[in-house]
Amino acid sequence: LAVSRLNPICESWTILEVEYLIVYYPFGHISPQTVHEREPLISPNPPSKPLNGGTSWNPGPGSSALSNEQALLSSILTKTAQNIIDVSAADAIMVEPHEYMDRARQYSAKLTVLSTSLPQNKALALPSLTSQPHQVLASDLVPYSDVQQVSKIAAYAYSAISQIKVDAKEDLVVQFAIP
């Protein structure tokens, strides 16, 4: 859950705006027939529902703060709905073996087409010195100060890497109770 920012909308309420939300459903809650991978879980334009079965509420001229709060809440809900990753769909989508093989063939065909379009004459990053070994062996030695400096930097890097520790601050997976 990546927290984007906290938005205070009035004195007693604060909305936590999130960038991504991963939703876990209980096993058997959604059947494979009802899962559509690209279908949003919350419609982008939710219909306004009247409260308690009455007529819809129309704010008066003095309630601009309430309409601003509603607009802010709607925008946060819309942003959150667009960024939901529904992991329950991953288990429900099963690929048949023949479909898997067809996809593998298509991907390998695309790969061969794309790899032939790449330039084949790439310049080597380092020159090859094996064709002239006598020049390599006859060259001057690396100065001892350079060897010491490389050894010192390697020791610092090893020390820094050995001191890296991961402290778990909170759970990575959060279960949501679905009624």
Image: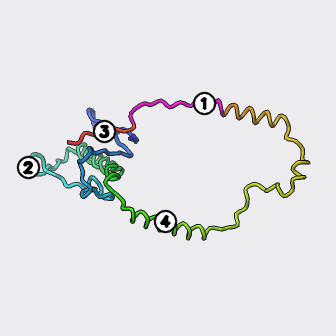
The answer for how far apart the CA atoms under marks 4 and 1 are is 41 Å
Q: Is mark 1 on a helix, strand or loop?
A: helix
Foreground mark, 1 or 2? 1
| Residue 107 disc label | 4
Which of the 4 image quarters holds residue 160?
top right
Report crowding for label 3: few under 14, some 14 to 19, many 20 or more residues within 10 A (C-alpha): few
Is residue 158 shown left or right of residue 40? right
Q: Position of residue 3 (x, y in %)?
A: 39, 40
Magenta-span inclusion, residue 173: no
Q: Name the residue under label 3.
A: 175
The answer for how far apart the CA atoms under marks 2 and 4 are is 57 Å
Marks 2 and 3, the one that precedes in the sequence? 2
**Quarter of the picture holding the N terminus:** top left
Looking at the image, the residue that sits furthest to the left is 54
In front: 38, or 28? 28
The answer for how far apart the CA atoms under marks 3 and 4 are is 36 Å
| Residue 162 disc label | 1
Q: Name the residue under label 2.
A: 54
166 over 136 or under it: above or below:
above
Is residue 145 shown left or right of residue 78? right
Q: Is mark 2 on a helix, strand or loop?
A: loop
CB atoms of marks 1 and 2 within 8 Å: no
**Quarter of the picture holding the C terminus:** top left
Instruction: Residue at 87% x, 53% y: name it.
Output: 133
The answer for how far apart the CA atoms under marks 3 and 1 are is 34 Å
Q: Position of residue 86 (x, y in %)?
A: 33, 50
Marks 4 and 1, the one that precedes in the sequence? 4
Looking at the rendered structure, the kind of residue marked 2 is Gly
Instruction: Residue at 30% x, 46% y: name it.
Output: 72
Residue stretch in magenta: 158-171
Looking at the rendered structure, the kind of residue marked 1 is Ser
